[in-house]
Amino acid sequence: MGKSGKKTKESHRQGRGRRGSELGDDDLPSSAYDAPPRRQEDSDGDDSDEATAEGEHDGGAEEGDLQGQWQVGSMPSKFHLYQLSVQSPKGDISYLQKFFLMYVGGRVPLHLQEDFCGTALLSTEWLRTDTRRTAVGLDFDRESLEWCLENNLSKIGADGYSRLLLFDGNVLQPNESRLVKQKISDLVQGLNFTSDDDSTEMNSCEQSDSSFTKCAANSTMSDAVLPGRDIICAFNYSCCCLHKRKDLVLYFRHAFNALSKRGGIFVMDVYGGTSSECKLRLQRRFPSFTYFWEQEEFDIITRETRISLHFQVGKKQMIRHAFTYHWRLWSIPEIKDCLEEAGFKSIHVWIREMPDTKSSGNAKEYTADRDVKYEELQRFNQADAWNAYIVGVANM
Ligand SMILES: C[S@@+](CC[C@H](N)C(=O)[O-])C[C@H]1O[C@@H](n2cnc3c(N)ncnc32)[C@H](O)[C@@H]1O
């Protein structure tokens, strides 16, 4: 996420019957499609493809944090490349907070649940922003969760560690998901968890005076006594991993039930436009690597598509299919209907038009215009490419 995202211009799309953005000067949230911009020095600088230990943008961890994760000459982890090219947790948090204040308000949101969390970069950044904050991450990819513990969580120290619970499990059966913990960090004094080794001394979870119950590794989410969540999010099009309508409604019900009884919001993103329904390859160049988004196919009967993310590091090293997703590209009205069915009282759609994927040069280098902000809209004419945030509000 580049600093240029902070400059706000008056939206050129006002006057089409749309409500102008009420959001101020923010970083944009993250998305695999809406890739973070180049920093000024990225475009000015050395164009060589040599791998360096530099951070590419200010989206996730601080620049200093990025250094040292990636040694010159060594192949970076696919998770590290993903975080650098796709994620912008500061932008996510700024939008989440504003959505919460607009639609719930009356208190500072403290408790986040990041569903489909992958490496839970957003959760770890959330913990940094306020020492009262807690986060719960849920994903069924153990490798991502463990990478988070070793690479993201290890940077926020013991205090942060005690405020994050990562669960390995299916969002459709969250209560059966199992707590994942880091053995090394477990040894740090004063932590809120027990290690695998001493879990025999503890029967699942015990009440403690801190924000979370003290839980043994492998406890289930239903064992843990968690605060009602102020915000639950499912980012980077993760809801598209669910292909059946009944699963989408079931997932939304779980999210609704986990929100605070004092009111909370569920936020997800989705993309679309004519370019989303055909084969498409976009690329974005960073100083030390190139990120590729490839839509391999789109079935108009099932609305299923396969997206692959590839990375090229240096001149020759290619990580093909670093991530591949089989998605059902849900439409906004389908999502709204399912949210309503799950109990959400009001639903708000925030959209941002994306640059035309067919305009000259874009196929080679897709550069999002950071000055086009998200707006809450009731209607939006089809475009080549758009990205949307859908906010479900649960006012109990
Ligand atoms: C597109 S990635 C998004 C990762 C992260 N949320 C982000 O913003 O970049 C989708 C993630 O959802 C996870 N996932 C897919 N289906 C799931 C399910 N039914 N339950 C839990 N996790 C799931 C995958 O393992 C993957 O980490």
Image (cartoon, rainbow, N blue to C red):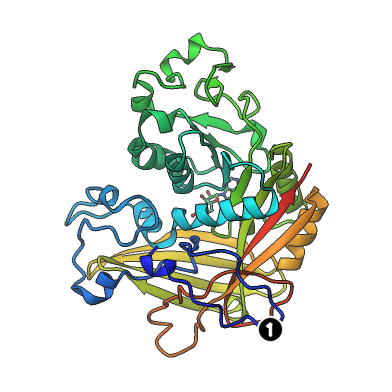
What residue appears at the point 69 percent right and 40 percent down from the top-left corner?
Answer: 259
The image quadrant where one finds the C terminus is top right
Image position, residue 98 (x, y; %) = 59, 55
Quadrant (top left, top right, bottom left, bottom right) of the N terminus? bottom left
Residue 253's quadrant in the figure? top right
Vertical arrangement, residue 165 with respect to residue 54, above or below: above
Question: Along the horizontal axis of the image, is 334 left or right of 366?
Answer: right
From the top left corner, tell me how far across and down residue 20 is, in percent: 63, 73
Q: Residue furthest front?
A: 106
Q: Secondary structure at mark 1?
A: loop
Left or right, residue 86 beside residue 383: left
In the rendered structure, the answer to whether residue 329 lies left or right of residue 1 reads right
Query: From the Cβ of disc 1, is ligand 1 less than 8 Å away?
Result: no
Q: Residues within 10 Å of mark 1 (few under 14, many from 20)?
A: few
Q: Amino acid at mark 1?
A: Arg
Q: Is residue 310 above or below residue 122?
A: below
Question: What residue do we see at 78% from left, 50% from top?
Answer: 344
Q: Count numbered badges in the picture.
A: 1
Q: Residue 317, image x and y in percent?
A: 26, 65
What residue would you read off at disc 1?
16
Q: Tell which residue pokes out farthest to the bottom in this image.
A: 360
For the point 69% across and 48% down, which residue is it? Answer: 104
In this rendering, the answer to whether 196 lies above or below 237 is above
Q: Nearer the viewer, residue 160 or 276?
A: 160
Residue 145 appears at what percent x and percent y? 45, 40
Q: Residue at the location (60% across, 69% down)?
A: 21
